[in-house]
Image: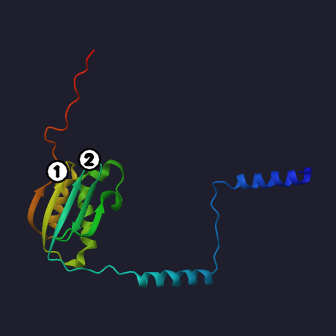
């Protein structure tokens, strides 16, 4: 390799490393943007649209851990209709496990499923977090009739077999 070729190769290597980690901004023309929008619209037409199911009864599962509160609404067959968590609503860190965050999660979830016209619900509570009471109170405050309330927190019964004693 001649000295001139070596200098060119060295310059190309430096160019590669100079731009590492930087994002390239592509400017697209209006025609390209319109074409992309048309293709995405065509794809969306092909997919099934989320239909608003009418539910008279539903199950609500509240998972209240020390770190977060997750609430899921299902129909009576167990198919998920909507789900929401304190982290998704916008709370961060230890605030996710508070009763206030749980009430905001229920409020957000009710806005999602307001077309379903749910009247009666079965509530299943799992976990020991502080958000469990706040979530139940918020559900009752939204005007839903709670038919049953069941605690499904897993409880260990005697646990696994202990190790044998060490012989010295």
Q: Is residue 18 left or right of residue 96?
A: right
Percent x, y of residue 31: 62, 84
Q: Is residue 85 left or right of residue 123?
A: right
Q: Residue at x 78, y 55 (%)?
A: 12
Q: Quadrant of residue 47?
A: bottom left
Q: Which residue is mark 1?
A: 153
Q: Nearer the viewer, residue 88 or 164?
A: 164
Residue 83 is tagged as: none
| Sequence-first tag of 2 and 1 | 2
Q: Quadrant of residue 16?
A: bottom right
Percent x, y of residue 163: 23, 29
| Secondary structure at numbered mark 1 | loop
Q: Nearer the viewer, residue 160 or 52?
A: 160
Crowdedness of circle 2 by 10 Å Cα count: few (<14), some, many (20+)? Answer: some
Which quarter of the image is occupied by the C terminus?
A: top left
- In the rendered view, how is the structure colored? rainbow
Q: Nearer the viewer, residue 100 or 79?
A: 79
Crowdedness of circle 1 by 10 Å Cα count: few (<14), some, many (20+)? Answer: few
Q: Residue at x 25, y 52 (%)?
A: 98
Q: Is residue 95 left or right of residue 120?
A: right
Q: Which residue is outermost to the top?
A: 168
Q: Residue at x 86, y 51 (%)?
A: 6
On screen, 27 above or below 149?
Answer: below
| Secondary structure at numbered mark 2 | loop
Q: Which residue is mark 2?
A: 66
Percent x, y of residue 84: 29, 63
């Amino acid at each position: 390799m001649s000295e001139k070729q070596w200098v060119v190769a060295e310059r190309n290597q430096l160019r590669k490393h100079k731009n590492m980690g930087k994002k390239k901004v592509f400017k697209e023309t209006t025609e390209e943007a319109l074409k992309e929008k048309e293709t995405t619209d065509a794809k969306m037409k092909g997919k099934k649209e989320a239909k608003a199911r009418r539910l008279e009864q539903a199950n609500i599962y509240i998972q209240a851990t020390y770190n977060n509160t997750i609430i899921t609404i299902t129909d009576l067959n167990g198919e998920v209709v909507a789900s929401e968590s304190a982290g998704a609503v916008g709370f961060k860190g230890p605030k996710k496990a508070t009763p206030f965050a749980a009430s905001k999660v229920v409020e957000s979830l009710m806005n999602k499923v307001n077309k379903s016209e749910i009247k009666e619900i079965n509530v299943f509570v799992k976990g020991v977090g502080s958000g469990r009471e706040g979530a139940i109170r918020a559900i009752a405050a939204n005007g839903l009739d709670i038919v049953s309330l069941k605690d499904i927190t897993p409880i260990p019964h005697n646990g696994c077999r202990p190790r044998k004693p060490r012989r010295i």
